[in-house]
Image: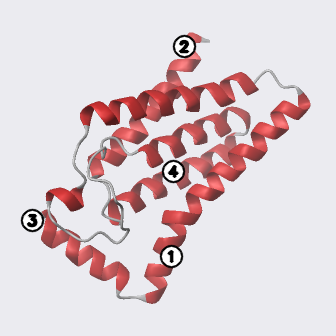
């Protein structure tokens, strides 16, 4: 059932130039924008000597390292491997699908941005949701991979508030 549904979704995206172009922008461009904003904000916080820089850098960093370790341990096969499909986005990786590191990183960065600027953080959070969706539509992750990545990033970010 997954293979048939995915093939229909893939055809819907790839057989229309505008949809395919929008997908490519979300899949490749949106992560670059989110991380560019994060980098600019980090430079700003360092420049003004803000004490918020520690949380701003530490929470996404710790989340990234712990999530990367979990992915290696879990080593869930990618959907295109399990179901023998050709994804929209070609990858040379067979495992480490769960959880989605792109989704988790974008969500953790969005939380860090929200810590500094709520409206900009909300926009980054919306971008993180779109990034997660693009990973599923691209055929490189399951919905559960993206949801788990998003949830883990939120958990790490909220944990900081209680530790602090």
Element assignment for label 2: helix
Number of the front mark, 4 or 2: 4
Question: Eyeballing the image, is 4 above or below 144?
Answer: below
Mark with earlier residue (3, 1): 3
Q: Is mark 4 in CB contact (under 8 Å) with mark 3?
A: no
Circle 4 sits on which residue? 128
Secondary structure under tag 4 reads helix
Front one among 7 and 87: 87
Whether label 2 touches label 3, CB < 8 Å: no
- 72 lies left or right of 116: left
Residues under labels 2 and 1: Cα distance?
A: 39 Å
User: Which residue is rendered at x = 57% and y = 32% of the image?
Assistant: 60
User: Dot 1 corresponds to which residue?
Assistant: 22
Determine which residue is flagged by label 3: 1
Give the residue furthest to the left. Answer: 1
**Is 26 left or right of 49, judged from the image as shown?**
left
Q: Which mark is residue 106?
A: none
Name which of mark 4 and mark 2 comes first in the sequence.
Answer: 4
Mark 3: secondary structure: loop
Disc with the residue nearer the chain's start (4 vs 3): 3
Q: Which sits earlier in the primary sequence, circle 2 or circle 1?
A: 1
In the rendering, at what x and y percent does residue 130 appear?
A: 47, 58
- Residue at left 21%, top 75%? 7
- Place of residue 101 in the rendered image (x, y in percent of width and height, measured from the top left): 43, 43
User: Label 3, label 1: how many angstroms apart (C-alpha)?
Assistant: 26 Å
Between residue 100 and residue 75, name the one nearer to us.
75
Query: Is the C-beta separation of discs 4 and 2 under 8 Å?
Result: no
Of labels 2 and 1, the one closer to you: 1
Residue 162: mark in rendering: 2
Locate residue 76, reporting x and y percent: 23, 43
Whole-number angstrom distance, CA of label 4 to CA of label 2: 23 Å
Residue 125 in the image: state x and y as whole percent. Answer: 55, 47
């Amino acid at each position: 059932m997954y293979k048939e549904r995915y093939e229909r979704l893939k055809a819907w995206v790839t057989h229309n130039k505008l949809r395919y172009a929008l997908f490519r922008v979300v899949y490749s461009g949106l992560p670059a924008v989110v991380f560019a904003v994060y980098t600019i904000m980090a430079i700003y916080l360092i420049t003004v000597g803000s004490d918020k820089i520690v949380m701003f850098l530490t929470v996404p960093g710790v989340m990234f390292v712990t999530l990367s370790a979990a992915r290696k341990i879990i080593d869930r096969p990618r959907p295109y491997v399990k179901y023998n499909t050709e994804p929209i986005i070609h990858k040379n990786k067979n495992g480490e699908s769960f959880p989605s590191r792109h989704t988790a990183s974008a969500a953790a960065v969005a939380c860090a941005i929200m810590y500094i600027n709520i409206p900009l953080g909300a926009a980054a959070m919306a971008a993180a949701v779109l990034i997660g969706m693009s990973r599923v539509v691209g055929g490189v992750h399951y919905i559960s991979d993206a949801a788990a990545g998003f949830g883990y990033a939120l958990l790490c970010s909220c944990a900081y508030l209680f530790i602090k």
